Amino acid sequence: MNSNSQPIKLFFVVVFSCTSLVVSLTPVLGKPTLGSSRSDAYGRLRLRSHPKTTLAQATTYNQPTLPPGPPPGGRVRGGARRGELAGCPVSKPDLTALVPFTEEDNSVINVWAQTTVEHPSWFFYVPYTKDSLYAVEFVLQEYPNSKDSKEIYRKAIALPDKPGVIRVSLPTTTPALAVDKQYRWFFTISCDKEKNSPPTFVEGVIQRVELNPATVKELQTTEPLKRYAVYAQKGIWYEALTTLAELRQKNPQDAALQVEWRNLLGSIRLNDIATKPLLLETPSSPQLKVLRAE
């Protein structure tokens, strides 16, 4: 009897030992820790134990509410409206303003965003090239519109060598935008030389606002990518877009900036524009520099 009990005892000892080992390991396997973590250059949390794993938190653009008064209306996409004759060739995507817009219950679109600078920049996706010889114009005027609306700026715009996103800046020689005042802008392409058909155009309203002193100080002392994040979170569309576009211009191969660009345009439902070439003037030359989203 003793000789038969020895294997049985040995079996229970082995089973108990293995079970204890599994139990002791369970908390370790069931509760993965971040270990020694750090933030990368863009403020995202990167796990040192898993160098290929990044917990990226996309910057969020916070759309401000429309100011009181008549809705601004506007048009974020070009192309012919119902009942209009098509003066320009059909293009997908159409002429597009890189600006936030809201759609009301009555199908009215409001194109409106804020700036903090006296002479801001606008960005437009243009599907046509200089070979088409179309007449292009940017106009800025006081808002609300009336017969006596004062025109602030009018400029003929040269079409690029290839379809892409272009920048139109208000020159410092023009009157500065006033704080808390709204202005209406138009970007128009006339494709019919005989002017028998209407042009394709986009339009919207821009308002200059002031930030609180603490935010201004933060913007003055932080690096460009964080400035972009601050502008986006504060609902300052024009500076957020301009800052990110300039960063991409300086770092055309930066994959993280390309992701931020797609996220920003995707947040205002312009995903189809996010992968289009970005065409910006270089500071030292009027030539266009091409940046492609990979």
Image: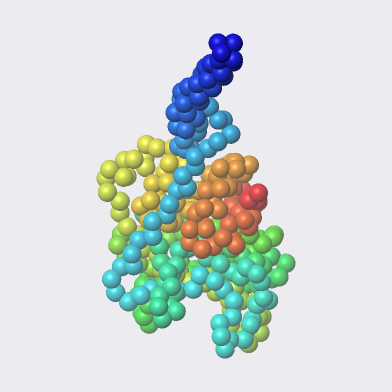
**As drawn, which residue projects farthest toward the right?**
131
Q: Residue at x 62, y 68 (%)?
A: 93
Residue positioned most to the front: 1
Relative to residue 134, is residue 99 depicted above or below?
Answer: above
Looking at the image, residue 283 sits to the left or right of residue 37; the answer is right
Asked whether, in this view, residue 261 is left or right of residue 164, the answer is left
Q: Residue at x 38, y 56 (%)?
A: 62
Q: Nearer the viewer, residue 15 or 252?
A: 15
Instruction: Please identify the quadrant where the N terminus is shown.
Output: top right
Q: Nearer the viewer, residue 201 or 259?
A: 259
Which one is nearer the viewer's eye here, 215 or 47? 47
Colouring used for the render: rainbow
Q: Is residue 161 above or below residue 230?
A: below
Q: Nearer the viewer, residue 56 or 81?
A: 56
Q: State which quadrant residue 237 falls in.
A: bottom left
**Image location (x, y in percent) of residue 141:** 41, 71
Where's residue 65, x and y in %? 33, 64
Q: Residue at x 59, y 15 (%)?
A: 4
- Say whether residue 28 is visible: no
Percent position of residue 18, x then y: 53, 22
What count of labels does the image hold?
Answer: 0
Percent from the top left, x then y, of residue 259?
A: 56, 48
**Residue positioned 56% across, 42% down in the render:** 256
Q: Quadrant of residue 63?
A: bottom left
Q: In the rendered view, does 213 fall on the left or right side of 51?
A: left
In this orientation, does residue 226 appear?
A: yes
